[in-house]
Image (spheres, helix red, strand yellow):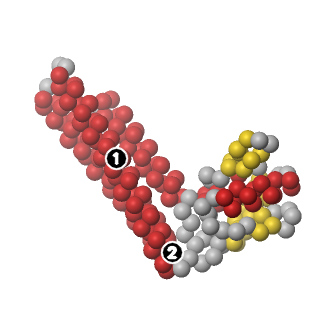
Amino acid sequence: MDARLEQFDTKMTKACEYLASDFATIRAGRANPHVLDKLKVDYYGSPTPLQQVGNITVPEPRMIQIAPWEKSLIRDIEKAIMASDIGITPSNDGNVIRLVFPELTEERRKELVKDVKKKGEESKVAIRNIRRDGNDFFKKLAKEDVSEDEIKQLEDKLQKLTDKYIKEVDKLVEEKSKEIMTV
């Protein structure tokens, strides 16, 4: 691949990877420990990722269990979960915290699918913006010693890259939507 195209390919790849990681945090009726990825717990005065203060397991399809390494953290972990947008009330028995995921209603599933499609559109816009930046970059090259034919080839290759990543986003959106709507 042309070195001038590589930087735009990398940026588009990152846009797709970000979307995929964002989709991992959307719960789809089943317990997925990734919904806790963005949670931070106040651990001796500093915000610490939940994964670093306890063991997270999925003992049942619709339950996440958090076993903190220090029992004194149970209250702080519950507080972090309550303050988050997960929408689940934690319960604890003094040793572990349990998050039981209720079955999603049809209405809630449709809302989540809308949200997934919106995030997909935002990713497509980001990819198109990268293409625009690339085209601007190539126009600046035209002022230097690069032929018009070469610029045209670079723009065509960039368009093909853009199309490839737009299809990737569509695929991610379709897969996540299907996962959400599956009961």
Quarter of the image with the N terminus is top left
Q: Residue at x 38, y 53 (%)?
A: 122
Q: Residue at x 22, y 26 (%)?
A: 140
Looking at the rendered structure, the kind of residue marked 2 is Arg
> Is residue 168 visible in this depiction of the protein?
no
Using the image, tell me which numbered label, if any, was put on residue 127.
1
Residue closer to the observer: 132 or 156: 132
Q: In the shown orientation, is residue 1 left or right of residue 111?
A: left
Q: Earlier in the sequence, mark 1 or mark 2?
A: 2
Q: Position of residue 105 (x, y in %)?
A: 53, 79
Residue closer to the observer: 168 or 36: 36
Q: Position of residue 8 (x, y in %)?
A: 34, 37
Q: In the shown orientation, is residue 85 left or right of residue 79?
A: left
Q: Position of residue 114 (x, y in %)?
A: 42, 67
Disc 1 from disc 2: Cα separation:
29 Å
Looking at the rendered structure, the kind of residue marked 1 is Ile
Q: In the shown orientation, is residue 142 left or right of residue 28?
A: left
What secondary structure is found at the residue carrying circle 1? helix
From the image, tell me which residue sits under label 2.
Answer: 108
Where on the picture, by quarter, is residue 33? bottom right
Q: Residue at x 85, y 68 (%)?
A: 93
> Is residue 86 visible in this depiction of the protein?
yes
